[in-house]
Amino acid sequence: MRMFYKLFNKKRKKVDDLGSKIFSNDVNELMENNFNVMFIPLFDLFENKEKFKLEYRWCSDYEYICLNCHYKYESFNTKYYLECLKENKCIIIEIKNLGSLVFTSCHRDDLFLVLQRYYKDVTSYVFKGNDTGGYFKILRNGIIIRKISSYLITEGIGNKPETRGEPCEYEVEKGKIWKVDMKAKSLKDMITDFYMKDVLDLFDYYVGLNNLKNDSIQRIIIYDLIED
């Protein structure tokens, strides 16, 4: 997994701005940096509806009108999808025999709070990461089974470091249990060993990075997320 992480980070020429980047147009490129994705082992999440409203049952702040963009998937286009995410759209990638990957931006990742209640009858996972830290969550019956979050900074805003629940299968198997240091002098020191590469390892364990192949894509659906 570590080798895979290094390989796909060298896979394309790195330049500064999105407009000049050279992409290989591979689904793994959406997991290279600054990703926010939820895996739900189901298909047809929004039933291809034209327009509908998602609400988080406990807080009226999390309400979205979802508008189908009628995107027709023909070939994978990394640059286009990254531009969609910058515009706060939601991208659903259905992987054959696996389920759906729901990508969105850091401005709309509270959408995952909504989805964890809508699809509570299955075990789902949330993965977030960038160069500053990582975030991982296992959900079952709409409840957090395990959460690991370091001081992940997105657009200048830091995420609160914390862990919840019992150690997951991956932690037990690898003999690496993440814990919060309550005596740390700063937030970033509360969990110092949980980064994007660790989130990718967890993704590989629970979902499988090798499953993210273009020829395994069943469908891609894009929705505008408009705050109500």
Image: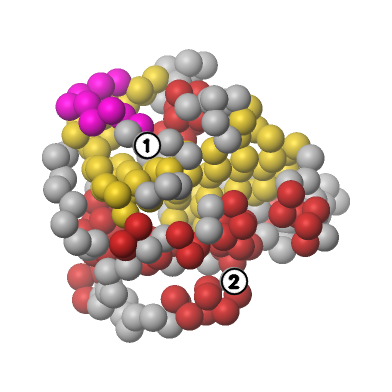
Residue 140 position within the rendered picture, expressed as x and y whole percent measured from the top left: 61, 30
Comparing 29 with 40, the one in front is 40
- Tag of residue 43: 1
Closer-to-camera residue (36/212):
212
Q: Which residues are magenta?
A: 45-53
Q: Which corner quadrant of the image does residue 225 belong to? A: top left
Q: Mark 1: give few (<14), some (14-19) or many (20+) Cα within 10 Å.
A: some
Against 206, residue 55 (above or below) is above
Q: Is residue 180 left or right of residue 149?
A: right
Relative placement, left or right, of 125 versus 150 is left
Secondary structure under badge 2? loop
Number of residues whose C-alpha sits closer than 10 Å to that of mark 2, classed few (under 14), some (14–19) or many (20 or more): some
Q: Is residue 86 among what the camera can see?
A: no
Residue 112 drawn at (x, y percent): 46, 35
Which structural element holds mark 1?
A: loop
Q: Is residue 147 left or right of residue 159?
A: right
Mark 2, residue position: 1
Asked if residue 50 lies in the magenta stretch, the reply is yes
Compare marks 1 and 2 and give the one earlier in the sequence.
2
Residue sitting at x 73%, y 38% = 164
At which x and y percent is residue 145?
Answer: 69, 35
From the viewer's perspective, is residue 180 above or below residue 129? above
Given the image, on which type of amino acid does mark 2 rest?
Met
